[in-house]
Image (cartoon, helix red, strand yellow):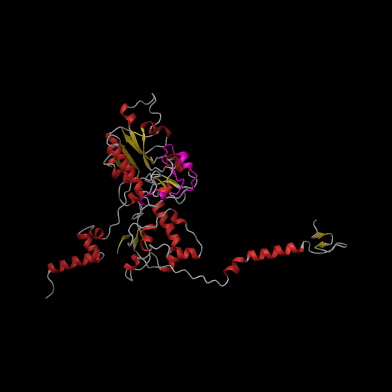
Amino acid sequence: MADYKNEFGWFAERPGVEKKVYNKFPVLIGLVAFVILATAPLWLNAGRDVPPPQPSLDTPAIQKLTQQERQCVLPLSEIRATHMQLLITWRDQVVRTGEGTQVPSPRVWTSPDGRKFVPSLTNTCLGCHSNKAEFCDQCHNYVAVVPNCWGCHLQEPATAGQVAQAEVK
Amino acid sequence: MGINRREFIRIAGLSTLFGLGGAKAAWELLRPGQVEAALQAIPTPLAAKRWAMVVDMRKLDEATAQQCIEACHRIHNVPNFRSPVKPEDKVTPAEAQRWEIKWIWTDPFHNAFPGAHQETMVMSERVHHMQFLLLCNHCNNPPCVRVCPTKATFQRSDGIVMMDMHRCIGCRYCMAGCPFSARSFNWRDPRPYIHKTYPDYPTREPGMVEKCDFCSKLLAKGELPACVVASKGALTFGDLNDEKSPVREVLKANFTIRRKPHLGTNPQVYYIV
């Protein structure tokens, strides 16, 4: 049935054979249905206004801090872009490389500006950002990423309303 | 008139102190350690070349053993399938036993030291009725580390056989490899069976293997393992490499046995019977 190629070339007309589209209607209907289905997400969401994420900093712990103290462990642009790498660094420090002899301790992480923190997602990050739904989930939902941190890591910090700082300078 | 000799020496001395590094250094020279103590102190981690534990079965009674288990399981968020938080999560006793997670537990002598009841190793009659407190032996030659395909289980340089739960794929090779049954598999979500979660340790997800890690988190904080603290002196923990460590003292003064030493894993939990 290889009609697309004959001795006269690719898709060449064969003398005596009618050239036409077979099963025209089912094929066309199928094509149209496919195009509509494939592009359905575009049509369904056209014109819908998706608000940009607005992570909320309104937690009791952050309210307590003065304007100067309101500084995450890294500068805003950096923490926004690289918080996942930072968490992996913390994980490796606590689980892998923190073997007691490390300086000064697997429990202390020093930020580039010299402040010291306990590397802990639950206690340090959520110590300030206790509002996971209004903070973490805002952007994660917007960009449709599902980090699997929360299957194990708890959402209630040890000292709610307190930053787990190793040393307050 | 200028300054006299006494005045000059005083000023020169003070300037030197401040020159050495400001007020903190000066204060430091006068009262060492005071500045650090005044700030919220960074705990000094407990470090060792080879951690080991000695269980003194003469001092350990059933109630104390239960307290050790309780202390450990509380701070590591170990679920108890026999007591669900909500009544609708209740499971049958058979299931509770099948899914049991244990970091530290008790077993009778014949289960802990199989083969010892045969004529090849005759023990005192008293020993046969003891309930031994068992935990991961943190073997020097750990089979679980060798079989782990993802290196989720690894041996630290201080001898602790540690788990990185992030890497565990739940293949359970380590459980097959461990001759001491020190490892437990999470067959289901543990959270409905943890009454009070401890915030300084994560829970686990289904499909992960877990076990005792000699409280590496507490060691990093400079504290002794929870079971040792709760044991009222029945458990001794220390550095096997340090001749003056409590563990060495106890091992020198007493005869000890270890679980299944013939398997060659070189367990590092010793029992005084």
Count of all numbered marks drawn on residues in the image: 0
Left or right: where does residue A131 sit relative to residue B21? right
Of residues B180 and B3, the one nearer the viewer is: B180
- Does residue A79 appear in this view? yes
Q: Is residue A119 visible?
A: no
Position of residue A50 measured from the top left corner of the image (x, y, whole percent): 51, 70
Q: Nearer the viewer, residue B57 or A19?
A: A19
The residue under the point 34% across, 35% down is B132
Principal secondary structure, stretch drawn in magenta: loop
Q: Magenta stretch: give its range.
A: B168-197
Quadrant of the image containing the C terminus of chain B = top left
B267 sits to left or right of A39: left
Please indicate whether residue B204 sits to the left or right of residue A27 in the image. Answer: left
Residue furthest to the right:
A16
Q: Residue at x 35, y 25 (%)?
A: B122
Residue B134 drawn at (x, y percent) = 36, 38
| A11 falls in the magenta region | no
In this rendering, would A68 be left or right of A143?
A: left
Figure quadrant of the N terminus of chain B: bottom left
Q: Residue furthest toward the front?
A: B88
Residue A34: image x %, image y %? 67, 63
**Residue located farthest toward the top when viewing the structure as drawn:** B119
Name the spot of residue B252 as percent of width and height, x first.
Answer: 28, 35
Residue B111 quadrant:
top left
* Residue B174 vertical position relative to residue A83 in the rendered view, above or below: above
